[in-house]
């Protein structure tokens, strides 16, 4: 998979040289310094920090209450709980056009040996999480065989640090549509007011709020049939695709060649018929004038929510159907609610969820290609042409009809933090249960810092900088040069970076070393 990039990220730049832009912290131990010197190889530090470049030290100046000092370089896990963790983007950080970036696997394995929790946080999607994780394990060489090898290598590693948890699993993996699972039992699960921010579990309000598990949802994406399977694996019980609607009601989209050549093979029967509200052009025999008593979800199809999992292929069909959904009465596709187009808009209608808002992404073509963000903009643009000019944008929070996920949006960072906290708890139990159990306070130590390692300033860095953790956790942004960020453009234009990271380093290995040194933990890998 090629790396996604922002509007301004036009060129993929792979920098072989570590370039730390922050001064080496004075507290670093000899062990830490040796680790960096080894990692940097022939590249010397270039402290190019300036006042205009680096307004970051919210993290840098923060007092460290849990810092540890090590007298010798070691990969052994300290006997206490790290108050920090990591979140890694994938494309441009761990992989470059599906190939591993040097040092990425070693960095993850090093953290795993030290029981330092981390998650992968990507705007990619389109595959089931377990499948994507298995592919990543293979590409990065982090399969179980390699773990067993590490486990037996007691010369260099603390054997009891490698427990039953693999380096990567679905427990520490978040892709663009993973948060959709929060809506199974709580339709407001991704909203700030309803999000479950308690460590290790969802909101206490979740059980009292209806979810979407048993309601009909519409899904689309690059391969709607596969997307449907993913949604069903998540637990959604009634999942329909645009193909189902088109097959049942071909007149909804009068360009039939695609029905036979593309959609017929994947279409399933709709669970219920559409409620066809009358209209001047309605030709269906059952089209009739609207009656409020007709809004019966036991008789007619009601779409409770529509999900865009990844980049749709047939924009025209999908925009038509999503627009039909937006103007329907309370989600009853086939009806038309005049209020939906008014300045205020209608209430109780179908809500749209877009899994990421990347406008462009990098492929093997020499210029960036449209991403899901372009599709979302197209849907919103068509809707803006239909609705009152006074109505808020479909994609704005004020519009109240859509939710944007993926980095840099807060909903994704909230979900990521909850996932990280759950993973941290399971990691402590699996790898350090006895130690943690001997020191309850230590085991419950708050997570003070998450290092967000990314290559895209517009998503990874902006999201980390803007996110306000409900737990007071500091999300410290670290930008690498192996993806969409272009250091040459950054040097030539002071306007290049709208979202300034706390630090800029050459690659993911350097980023991990930088963070470990700041925390006073071993960085010798
Ligand atoms: Mg990236």
Image (cartoon, helix red, strand yellow):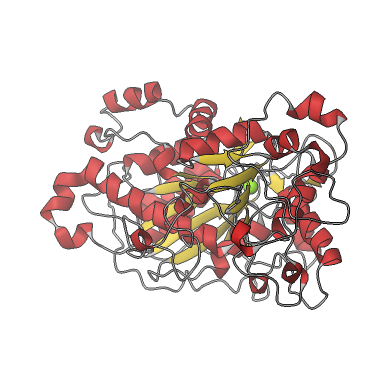
Number of marks drawn: 0
Q: Residue at x 77, y 61 (%)?
A: 380
Name the residue nearer the viewer: 52 or 80.
80
Q: Residue at x 42, y 44 (%)?
A: 172
Name the residue nearer the viewer: 486 or 29.
486
Q: Is residue 93 left or right of residue 516?
A: right
Q: Residue at x 68, y 50 (%)?
A: 275
**Residue 66 locus on image (x, y percent):** 29, 64
State whether residue 343 appears in this view. Answer: yes
**Residue 112 locus on image (x, y percent):** 36, 40
Among the 4 quarters of the image, the one containing residue 394: bottom right
Q: Is residue 157 left or right of residue 131?
A: left
Q: Residue at x 63, y 64 (%)?
A: 292
Residue at the far left: name it: 438
Quadrant of the image for the N terminus? Answer: top right
Q: Is residue 385 left or right of residue 191?
A: right
Q: Is residue 519 above or below residue 507?
A: below
**Residue 76 locus on image (x, y percent):** 28, 42
State whether residue 7 appears in this view. Answer: no
**Residue 144 locus on image (x, y percent):** 38, 25
């Amino acid at each position: 998979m090629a790396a996604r990039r922002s509007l301004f990220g036009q060129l993929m730049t792979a920098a072989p040289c570590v370039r730390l832009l922050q001064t080496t912290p004075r507290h670093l131990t000899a062990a830490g310094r040796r680790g960096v010197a080894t990692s940097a190889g022939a590249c010397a530090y270039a402290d190019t920090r300036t006042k205009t470049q680096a307004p970051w030290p919210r993290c840098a100046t923060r007092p460290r209450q849990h810092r540890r000092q090590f007298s010798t370089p070691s990969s052994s896990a300290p006997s206490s709980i790290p108050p920090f963790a990591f979140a890694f983007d994938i494309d441009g950080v761990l992989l470059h056009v599906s190939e591993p970036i040097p040092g990425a696997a070693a960095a993850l394995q090093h953290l795993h040996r030290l029981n330092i929790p981390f998650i992968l946080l990507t705007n990619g999607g389109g595959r089931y999480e377990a499948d994507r994780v298995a592919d990543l394990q293979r590409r990065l060489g982090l399969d179980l065989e390699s773990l067993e090898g590490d486990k037996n290598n007691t010369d260099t590693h603390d054997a009891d640090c490698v427990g039953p948890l693999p380096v990567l699993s679905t427990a520490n993996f978040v892709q663009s549509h993973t948060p959709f699972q929060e809506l199974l039992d709580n339709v407001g699960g991704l909203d700030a007011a309803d999000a479950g921010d308690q460590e290790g579990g969802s909101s206490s309000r979740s059980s009292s709020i209806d979810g979407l598990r048993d309601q009909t949802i519409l899904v689309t994406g690059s391969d709607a049939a596969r997307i449907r399977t993913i949604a069903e694996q998540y637990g959604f019980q009634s999942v329909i695709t645009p193909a189902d609607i088109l097959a049942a009601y071909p007149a909804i989209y009068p360009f039939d060649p695609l029905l036979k050549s593309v959609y017929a093979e994947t279409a399933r029967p709709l669970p219920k018929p559409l409620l066809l509200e009358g209209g001047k052009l309605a030709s269906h025999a059952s089209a009739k004038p609207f009656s409020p008593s007709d809004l019966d979800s036991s008789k007619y199809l009601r779409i409770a929510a529509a999900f865009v999992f990844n980049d749709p292929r047939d924009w025209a069909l999908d925009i038509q159907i999503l627009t039909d959904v937006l103007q329907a009465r309370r989600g009853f596709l086939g009806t038309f609610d005049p209020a939906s187009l008014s300045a205020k808009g209608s209430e109780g209608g179908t809500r749209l969820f877009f899994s990421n808002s990347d406008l462009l992404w990098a492929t093997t073509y020499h210029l960036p290609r449209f991403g899901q963000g372009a599709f979302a903009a197209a849907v919103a643009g068509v809707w803006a042409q239909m609705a009152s000019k006074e109505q808020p944008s479909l994609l704005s929070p004020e519009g109240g009809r859509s939710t944007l996920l993926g980095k840099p949006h807060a909903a994704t960072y909230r979900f990521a933090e909850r996932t990280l906290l759950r993973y941290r708890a399971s990691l402590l139990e699996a790898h350090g249960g006895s130690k943690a159990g001997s020191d309850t306070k230590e085991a419950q130590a708050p997570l003070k810092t998450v290092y967000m390692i990314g290559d895209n300033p517009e998503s990874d860095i902006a999201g980390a900088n803007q996110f306000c953790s409900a737990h007071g956790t500091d999300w410290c942004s670290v930008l690498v040069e192996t993806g969409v960020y272009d250091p040459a453009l950054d040097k030539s234009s002071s306007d290049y970076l709208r979202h300034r990271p706390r630090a800029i380093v050459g690659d993911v290995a350097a980023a991990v070393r930088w963070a470990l040194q700041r925390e006073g933990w071993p960085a010798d890998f």
